[in-house]
Image: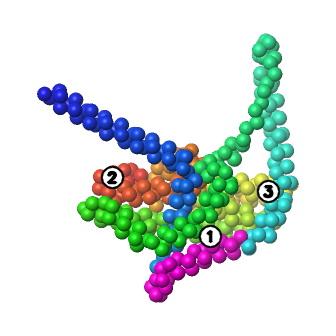
Amino acid sequence: MLETKLSQTFSTVASSTSLRIIAAAIVLICLYFASSVVITLICAILIAFVLDPGVVLLERLHVPRWFGSVVVILLALGLVCLLIYLLYDRATTFVRDLPAFTAKIKQITVYFQNLFSHIRQSTSSIASSSPENNLPAIRVQQESGWTRFLLRGIGSIYAFSMTVMFIPFLVFFMLTAKRHLYFSTVNLFPPEHRQEVENIFNAIAQMIREYVFGNFLVAAISMALIAPVYLAIHLRYALILAGLSAVVDLVPYIGVALATLPPLLVALMQFNKATPIIVIAIAVAVVHFISINILTPKLVGGRVRLNALAVTVAMMFWGWLWGAMGLILAVPIMAALKAVCDNLPRLKSIGYWLGEGS
């Protein structure tokens, strides 16, 4: 009798575990094959959370919510267009000169490729000259690994552009129907769990706002600090490169390398001395130190407190799944998961593990 109960219990646990594994596999497959749609929805949700305080402010001024949503979205689009307009002249100059830079970079790349090929041939000369070794080699040119990494998760540029066009409409519908979506989602859960769901929504909303606004301020201050250095050494496209360095510097761990590479490449093509290159490397390192140790803790706030291991694993997983977009969205996704775990008693131990600790 006891053996029968143990066998039934084991079968139930095994069946439940198998179903969970199958469900997780199905979710992973959906995230991979429907990546462009999921990424678009996540970006729209992030933008809606960020713009919602503006709509609420207009509501307090007795502006209808639908009209306030239109006004806020148009203001956001106008700000983006204004930034593009201010950088348009320098961007067109950069695009016009890009083939020359690309040609020089290719020359450097070919030089190192030939050098490595010569070393490889020298080291392999000790091999026996058997008939098999004399067979002609066939090379298959493949797509660049960086191109595949950047496009992974978003499909082709055309498909992604068509999908991105839906983001303003999605944000408008999310802002307009916020209350209906909020209460309808909460009512999907049993009454005893609805307060937990409300706490999770509020925690995620607060976290996203602090994360996005905080990082925006960090990037703006970093650009204000590094742009004068680029201008002082007369680096070409100083403002564009300063903005690019400030934005990519926000990527955890690898941000400082990504922020240093573009200005260094331009400096290598522009200058024939090492002083500007050293200045650029020092400036990016100092600004990165300030942003990581001073600006980010003060401006991003205490909501996004993930330990280094959790951030690294999240970037590895989402970067593998969605490429460059996965790296960008890895931290907010993991922070949202932590907010869920922190507000569910049975998952608080996982939330504690994801956090920094005391």
**Toward which corner of the image does residue 2 lie, by quadrant?**
top left
Q: Nearer the viewer, mark 1 or mark 2?
A: 2
Q: Which residues are magenta?
A: 57-84
Q: Amino acid at mark 3?
A: Val
Whole-percent x and y of residue 183? 36, 69
- SS of the residue under disc 1: helix
Lateral position of residue 100 relative to residue 150, left or right: right
Q: Count residues near mark 1 (Cα–Cα under 10 Å), then give few for <14, some for 14-19, many for 20+.
A: some
Depth order, front residue of 49/300: 49
Give the left or right position of residue 190, taking residue 56 as reference: left
Secondary structure beneath label 2? helix
The residue to which callout 3 is attached is: 266
Would residue 160 be found to the left or right of residue 236 on screen?
A: left
Residue that sits furthest to the left in the current view: 1
* Residue type marked 2: Leu
Report which residue position mark 2 lands on.
347
Q: Residue at x 85, y 44 (%)?
A: 107
Query: Disc count in the image?
Result: 3
Are the residues at dot 2 and dot 3 in contact (C-beta closer than 8 Å)? Answer: no
Sequence-first disc among 1 and 2? 1
Mark 1–mark 2 CB contact (< 8 Å): no
Helix, strand or loop: magenta stretch? helix
Asked whether residue 113 appears in the rendered view, the answer is: yes
